[in-house]
Image (cartoon, grey):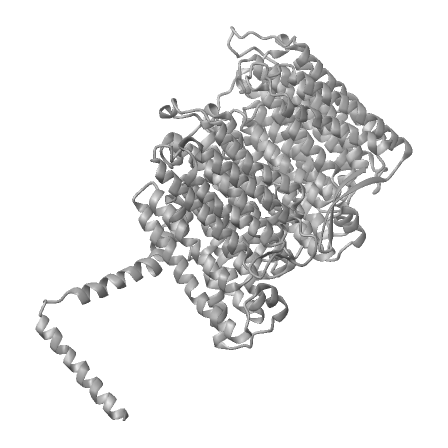
Amino acid sequence: MFSSLMLVSLLVLTLPIMSSIFNTHKNSTFPHHVKNTISYAFITSLIPTMMFIHSGQETIISNWHWMTMQTLKLSLSFKLDYFSMIFVPVALFVTWSIMEFSLWYMHSDPYITRFFKYLLTFLITMMILVTANNLFQLFIGWEGVGIMSFLLIGWWYGRTDANTAALQAILYNRIGDIGFIMAMAWFLFNTNTWDLQQIFMLDPNLTNLPLLGLLLAATGKSAQFGLHPWLPSAMEGPTPVSALLHSSTMVVAGVFLLIRFHPLMENNKTIQSLTLCLGAITTLFTAICALTQNDIKKIIAFSTSSQLGLMIVTIGINQPYLAFLHICTHAFFKAMLFMCSGSIIHSLNDEQDIRKMGGLFNAMPFTTTSLIIGSLALTGMPFLTGFYSKDLIIETANTSYTNAWALLMTLIATSLTAVYSTRIIFFALLGQPRFLPLTLINENNPFLINSIKRLLIGSIFAGFFISNNIYPTTVPEMTMPTYMKLTALAVTILGFTLALELSLMTHNLKLEHSTSVFKFSNLLGYYPTIMHRLPPLANLSMSQKSASLLLDSIWLENILPKSISQFQMKTSILISTQKGQIKLYFLSFLITLTLSMLLFNLHE
Amino acid sequence: MLKIIIPTIMLMPLTWLSKKNMIWINTTTYSLLISLISLSLLNQPSNNSLNFSLMFFSDPLSAPLLVLTTWLLPLMLMASQHHLSKEPLIRKKLYITMLTMLQTFLIMTFTATELISFYILFEATLVPTLIIITRWGNQTERLNAGLYFLFYTLMGSLPLLVALISIQNLTGSLNFLLIQYWNQALPDSWSNIFLWLACMMAFMVKMPLYGLHLWLPKAHVEAPIAGSMVMAAILLKLGGYGMLRITTMLNPQTSFMAYPFLMLSLWGMIMTSSICLRQTDLKSLIAYSSVSHMALVIVAVLIQTPWSYMGATALMIAHGLTSSMLFCLANSNYERTHSRTMILARGLQTLLPLMAAWWLLASLTNLALPPSINLIGELFVVMSSFSWSNITIILMGANITITALYSLYMLITTQRGKYTHHINSIKPSFTRENALMALHMTPLLLLSLNPKIILGFTY
């Protein structure tokens, strides 16, 4: 009953894709059909989730044998444990809203049907990823979401930027995949299995190498420092794509992978501190980058990256359940923030620059409300969704005795969250309008209102519900001094006040000379400038000059074919250069003749 | 086996006796029927081989390659229809005859029980291929390409003949079926090292090994579409097949002789795939990508573990279908823009949306997207090379990344972006072409449901 209901809700998702095979006619109701299907899948998935929470089960694994190779058994195996049981409804809920939102956002696109198919395929691969019980199946989902993100970022395929961003996303993801494949190879080699529960049961020693691989994979997928530039670039895709893939589902796959492997990680201190430092660097660096951006989607993208860093920090302090809680709560408000920005962008005729917005609280009251609530939830305002996970994370981090620098960086990043949220609110919503007066602003579309409203309710209440139903295996610290309890709140309020004051003060000032700090933040820490110029240049010129020209066209050609033909040519020229003195040549036969005569005679 | 070989030979009279408007349809249907018959070979009920006669046999290694060969003939015929449409009837018939002849030789090569007959047939496949390249190629460079193709392969394989004769002298038999049981360790001596080299070089040139690969881009680029297809899909696999077969007799030598070639392959795999990043010529890009993929097969065969053999076999089949499909796609561009230069055929997605879907699928399988069989193959090769030496993962990983990059670079350049004005008036894609792509794609997808049948004899 339980697992079959869950499988039903997963199978329901494949129906629209199947129907598109048989139905070759253009069907204009297809997007609605997809949206409804997802809502049915969501409602169906709620039942097993509630049963699961109610009955307090641990894990349900269903196996379907696929093939056995040598000693390795590969099966189609679904793992329905706490993580997948909670994540599936959350993802379905968010996707449902985003689908409805895209009905509004993409309504003029001639290929809206294909767009919905892509989104749905993405959702299916994501579901494969979260329910997978063996590494191979996980890898199918892992690569599937990567490719779907490539297709969706490059949705407007006429634009060069979109294509570049799509290729960039694949490149960074592929670098991460090396780690994943290495981990797969290591587990196969050392534990002879890809099944998660068998790996954990065998609990191999010296897990540095595979866990490093998994960390690299998570770095690529979750846009951690080093492999982060693809996430802001991915904002070239349509806004629903950013809302679905690049805030709530796909980018958390890396964090999810690490959560899945926490039984191995919790025994490995080296990897944990690496994870902690990586997360802390990411969360601070991307928060700094977010401060001076002017593109509203880029700010939210960097904020996503920063939150992902926070999740990785949480894994680093050995609290996978809290990280998971943050994944779930983050999905609600971040998807909503993207949808609000989509609403603004669409209403202002594709204007993404926050300097050209302003005063939208009069024109778009509903979007304004949602944006503010979303931002507050993001900064961890008490009793909104974000509070339940973020506050807990910061408290646990404060009371833990691990790397103080990493924790300090996380705190600063938390404060900066409030700063850039204020900046969006201040520039986009408050003040006088700075957009063209002739813009027709209308947010009264049921698709838009309903979808945002649903996530708005989620952003207010979801954290409460989910955090009430979580049972952390490693219990976070419950008692602490008052000042520690209030740190998270204090730094956030500090961030808010500072940002508001600074924005008000500098609003009418002109930036004469940009300081080096401003340049650092605005140019994304010079990272793309350096990393996207020098290594590709070196690489491509190596492949052109050394691999293609020097080796293939010159050396390898010369060593074998050309030198042989040259040699033949030379010898034949040498031999055929003769004067035509027939008498002399025939006379030369005499020499051989006499020689042979002499030799034959000697033999006798 | 005769039930496949004789019908294939009978394709020739069919071609010559068919009426003008029936030659394509007759031969395509007939060859498709032959390939359906051959499917039954995939069912290998026992661990032993299916022994049909003293001359021919098939086992789990040769059966998938054989099926691939028979499957590809109808596809080659379908692909060549357009570029031969302007030729006189007799030349069309000659062309089909050449393809059929090649097919016959290939079937017999894959099923030969005897190394000498394998060798003779292996060499015999050169003749029709050479004729196809040099007669029906598009540019004058085809003659040069033919020379390269012929001489590289011949120079590589002549020592093999000597080696085979010497082995025949030593053991008294060159029968594949016997060799497995006869198998004795070769003594450690200089002459045996040369024996190893002589045996392996022929196949390494055919694969091709990096450094000996120059013939491949030239021949692939200059050959007509059917030639490119059959070379990428099957002729390269002859090398892999031969290596898999002959390594059983070269036993202790392989363990240390393999090192330089392993290194060269690992290095060459990176080199050739980075060459792909700078290619402007579509067919040349696909050809270099073949070299890079085949380097993986060489690595796998030389590592000599059950997993690597499985990987090598799966990768050969997967790459056969994928690269052949990519050549078909490149050809469909070529027939429209009359140029292989990628930059002249940009933004085709706007004009030919269905073709863009095929491009997408082909590129994705080329970069080994799970759960395609390309991934199964590559993954197994990576696994076995990782267990052979952990450091190889760096090279393998770099290659995986570069493969993804150039596959998508090819996709983006040809399909995405704005289309250029001179391709405004191109023909729409034909049903024939779409069917051709579908016939490439379907086996790839179906095989990924059950990759067991292409995992070779160590499965």
Residue farthest toward the front in the current orientation of the protein: B17
Q: Residue at x 68, y 37 (%)?
A: A253
Q: Position of residue A396 (x, y in %)?
A: 78, 39
Which is more toward the observer, B419 or A221? B419
Q: Is residue B363 left or right of residue B373?
A: left
Q: Residue at x 75, y 21 (%)?
A: A39
Q: Is residue B47 left or right of residue A154?
A: right
Which is more toward the observer, A368 or B400? B400
The answer to whether residue B437 shows anywhere in this view is yes
Query: Please, is residue A222 above or below residue A13 in the view?
Result: below
Q: Position of residue A261 (x, y in %)?
A: 74, 45
Q: How many marks?
A: 0
Which is more toward the observer, B42 or A286? B42
Q: Quadrant of the C terminus of chain B?
A: bottom right
Which is more toward the observer, B317 or A366? B317
Q: Residue at x 58, y 69 (%)?
A: B251
Query: Please, is residue A213 above or below residue A127 in the view?
Result: below
Q: Is residue B446 left or right of residue A160?
A: right
Q: Position of residue A26 (x, y in %)?
A: 59, 17
Which quadrant of the structure image shows residue B303? bottom right
The answer to whether residue B277 shows anywhere in this view is no
Residue farthest toward the right in the current orientation of the protein: A55
Q: Position of residue A273 (x, y in %)?
A: 70, 48
Query: Please, is residue B357 above or below residue A276 in the view?
Result: above
